[in-house]
Image (tube, rainbow, N blue to C red):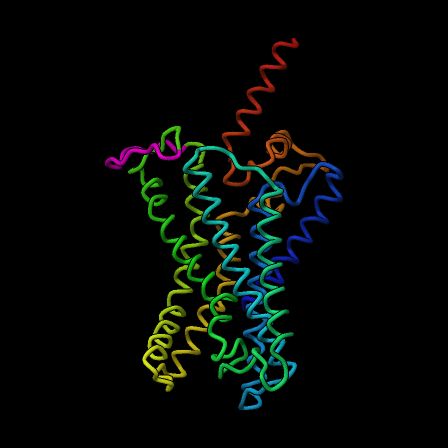
Amino acid sequence: MSFFACLVTYGLILRNVRYYAKRTPGKWRLLKVPMDIYLLSLFAADACIGFGTAMNAKWVQDGKTQIGRWCTAQAVFLCIGLTTMSFNILTIAVHTFVMVWTNKGFHSMLVAWTSVAASWLYSILYVTVLGSVYRGPNSALRPTPYWCWIGEDFLIHRLWAGYIWLWVALFVSVLLYVPLFFWGRGNITVGDKFWSFQIHRAGNVDDRGGSRRRSMSLLAYPLVYSCLVLPLSVGRWIGFEQASHGDKKVHVPASATLAIQTIYALSGICNVILFLTTRPNLLLFKRGSVVSGETAVSGESAMLSGDADSIEGGGEKVLDISHSRAERAGSEI
């Protein structure tokens, strides 16, 4: 479900590109703001996890897991997907917090491309080097035992190829979500400086431009991520605790292990649903601004602002640009 949800989303994005290319040639961009880049990368990581988990169908059919090309391929997909998705969720959480807390727009596409490229490069290089160093009967990519990932004898690589980044993203997401939640309720007012803020009782929040609503909607990604990762983390912590006491017998039931892995693998479809319900204006999904083959004034203003459909500005910036344009027109008249 997650894998095909991501594929369908990419198909819809390609449809949108074709739609805009025909009707507004040269007047549109697919990637207008950093969040576009983060979401494209997130869906790709989700697709890797979904496809890697779906490969369990072979083990169900065979009735066992065994080292081989299929096992290695599954381990590669799961390693790359887990690490990259954790990086992307971490980036979205930090990006949202900085945007809200500093009350400033952050439009650096270079930073977005660099962070996304670094996450993919790290995950691909790590699993490639690991698979090259440990090969054959001593392969690090082996059954674990219900599916293939990094063997339990390679704990340090399990940590650095997945668990550490998974838990860092979980911890940082929860840490940043708490103050932003109270900011959205009106309990926190942020000053001009990063460290300047006030805590008070919730009052009437002026959100006519919808900036608070858009900010809180982006927090749904790390929040859902936390709900998906917590069961998996609890299962892993129990196993680590048993291993630290020399207990080599796994006491976590197989049904529980498979259940928490399935829950985690649903991240793809969860993120796609979140995107289509909370951020439908990104990645060219909003067609209302295209009328009779031309870009309407509102759509043109949004495109000039570069971020009207994202947290970076919203409707406020479109109004500002329209207002400044009106002033210039008035002065020319």
In the image as oriented, which residue stretches furthest toward the bottom?
63
Give the residue at x 53% y 83%.
Answer: 143
Query: Quick check: 254 left or right of 81?
Result: left
Can you say whether 165 is above or below 187 in the image? below
Q: Position of residue 33 (x, y in %)?
A: 59, 41
Q: Give the quadrant of residue 98.
A: top left
Give the residue at x 63% y 29%.
Answer: 297
Can you say whether 177 is above or below 292 in the image? below
Q: Is residue 236 magenta?
A: no
Q: Position of residue 47 (x, y in %)?
A: 58, 65
Report the number of numbered marks. 0
Give the residue at x 46% y 38%.
Answer: 99
Give the residue at x 75% y 38%.
Answer: 26
Q: Main secondary structure of the magenta part?
A: loop
In the image as oriented, which residue stretches furthest toward the front?
133
Image quarter in which the C terminus is found: top right
Q: What residue span does the magenta drawing correspond to? A: 194-207
Image quarter in which the N terminus is found: bottom right
Q: Position of residue 49 (x, y in %)?
A: 55, 68
Q: Position of residue 301 (x, y in %)?
A: 61, 30
- Nearest the camera: 324 or 172? 172
Q: Is residue 199 magenta?
A: yes
Query: Quick check: 311 left or right of 26?
Result: left
